[in-house]
Image (cartoon, helix red, strand yellow):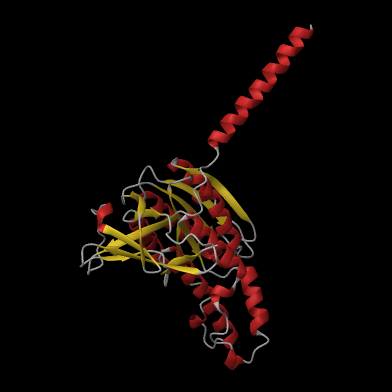
Amino acid sequence: MRLAALFIFILTVFSSSVVLTFAQVDDPVNVDSAIVRVNIGVVDHRGRPITNLDRPHFSVFEDGVKQDISHFELSSAPFSVVMMLDMSGSTKSFRQNIALSAARFLDALAPEDKVAVIEFYEKVNVLNELTTDRAKIAHSIRVANGTGDTNLFKGIETALERLAKEGNRRKAIVVLTDGADTQAKNKDRKFLSSLAEGEMPGAIKPEANSDLARILDRADRLGVTIYPLALPTGDPAKLVDPTPLQVAMWTAARSRLKLVADRTGGTLNAISRLDEMGKLYAVVAAELRTLYTVEYQPANLKRDGKWRAIRVEVSEPDLIARSRQGYFAK
């Protein structure tokens, strides 16, 4: 009886060890924090994408110092993409447009690209994890719903958490939103209300928002490119007589979306009319299919919190490279 009990005990310990071992194997690869990953778009002088380049065509500089490229991926390499859909109250009247346009974006991706769908409003819900199952993704797009506030920054944080599990795969976020994160908007209103109307224009610095700064730092570390699709809702230019407060708050929200795109190497696409939404989704999908990716270990390994400027050059003089502008070494 004792031998049987001992055997069961040993078997239990061994099984637990095996389960633990497999759990550790399934954990995401932790990329060395010193590795910098940069997605790069290349166009000719007419703006046409160039997709036939190889590693020797690229040179990367950090603070003017040429870096050794340790890894290179062609523009055909698959992406892990998080689609974020703004389901706050301001988008309730055109949900069908959103669903149709998002579906068009999905159709334009490569079959091996993985996609997650996140809806955000006063809550943030992951409708499906990263997958290549197009039927599951399409269902998530159709059922996305919500109302109330715009929890944009929390939504981006959630998207980054999912992408952090993707190891060395290329990563991007495509976020459809009016850009007015409710918590940031409330802070803006409180701050601006303490100023005279003449002091409001330009008073808010988009980079000063601590929540956004934290998000951008994590996007830097993961090498995530973010593409905001900015909805026209709330634009004071459409009002007969907008107040300085309304203009300043809308400008601050749009400036933050621009900062997100510029800092991560993405593009801010402003939707002027709802019938443009599908076309701009397709433009983003096409741009993803033209990006190269390089990695390098910085020659300067100091984590002093200072800005490191990134510049990418292409050996062909008539070509133009675009990437994120840099990162804070934290």
Picture quadrant where residue 9 is located: top right
Using the image, determine if residue 262 lies above or below residue 33: below
Residue furthest right in the image: 2
Q: Seen in the image, is 149 located left or right of residue 74?
A: right
Q: Position of residue 178 (x, y in %)?
A: 52, 69
Residue 24 rendering spot, x and y as whole percentages: 57, 35
The answer to whether residue 231 shows anywhere in this view is: no
Please count the marks in the image. Answer: 0
Give the quadrant of the N terminus: top right
Q: Nearer the viewer, residue 323 or 118?
A: 323
Q: Residue at x 67, y 85 (%)?
A: 193
Quadrant where the image shows the C terminus: bottom right
- Looking at the image, residue 212 sits to the left or right of residue 237; the answer is right
Which residue is more in the foreground, 61 or 285? 61
Quadrant in the picture for residue 208: bottom right
Q: In this rendered view, identify the residue nearer to me: 167 or 61.
A: 61
Residue 245 seen in the current view: yes
**Up-down relation of residue 326 to residue 25 (above or below):** below
Residue 67 screen position, x and y as percent: 36, 59
Q: In the rendering, at what x and y percent does residue 2 appear? A: 79, 8
Give the residue at x 67% y 17%: 11
